[in-house]
Amino acid sequence: MASLSNLPGFDPRLAPVLGVDAHLPAVPRAAQTPQALRARFAHPPHWVPEVVLEKQLMGRAPTQASVLLAIVLREQPMVLLTERTAHLSTHSGQVAFPGGRADPQDASAADTALREAQEEVGLERAFVELLGTLPAYVTGTSFRITPVVALVQPDCRLLPNPCEVADLFEVPLAFLLDPANHRRHVYARDGLHREWFSMPYQDGDKNRYIWGATAGMLRNFYRFMQA
């Protein structure tokens, strides 16, 4: 079966909003400094991820993959995201973290994320400080994705691969860790029921529509930081 985003007439921006989680507390700014982030991953709290498995739309064993949740250490910490090119076979045109499927030569999930980030956006490993990983997230298209969280120096040089990346942009970490910006959606049609998060971000004149797996992993990151 095709992925949800490829269903005829489906537009995630038009899906009904079930609610906005403004009643939940935002992660304090003091917890978002490099020192606080290092301490959180060095001594992680007990917590339970909220979203780990989407409704399966494809009947095959999951493919191992990793993404890099890259926090760029600007005056205000920012999260690096990409807009995928329209011609890609999966998740075309969607907002995503740098990353992709594991190769046999990758030694770990972190190695996959770093290699893919270098191939996709030109991020060299010398600018990256790994913090740790979040629990794997299994998509409806049967990818088992491990989010690898890292700090990135702001003077890094980025060169997106035009075959995979249509655009690069950054979103404030504080915006993503404030559930007042987390919307809940539902799709129920033709016997298919799916729920997901979105985190629309107005970036100048562009509306960056973060949804699906990317938003789900960010929601888990919020839960990890708030625990």
Image (tube, rainbow, N blue to C red):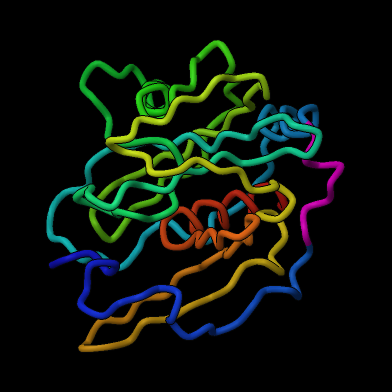
x, y percentage for residue 80?
56, 39
The answer to whether residue 51 is left or right of residue 109 is right
x, y percentage for residue 17?
53, 83
Name the residue at 38% across, 44% down.
Answer: 166
Name the residue at 16% across, 49% down.
Answer: 61
Comparing 133 with 67, the one in front is 67
Name the residue at 20% across, 66% down.
Answer: 57
The answer to whether residue 135 is left or right of residue 64 is right
Q: Is residue 179 above or below residue 45?
A: below
Q: Give the magenta-colored segment's residue range.
A: 26-33
The answer to if 28 sits in the magenta stretch is yes
Residue furthest to the right in view is 30
Comparing 46 with 68, the one in front is 68
Q: Is residue 152 above or below residue 147?
A: above
Residue furthest to the top in view is 126
x, y percentage for residue 81?
51, 43
Name the residue at 40% across, 73% down.
Answer: 12
Residue 23 picture quarter? bottom right
The answer to whether residue 102 is left or right of residue 152 is left
Q: Is residue 44 above or below residue 95?
A: above
Q: Which quarter of the figure is the N terminus placed in?
A: bottom left
Comparing 141 with 9, the one in front is 9
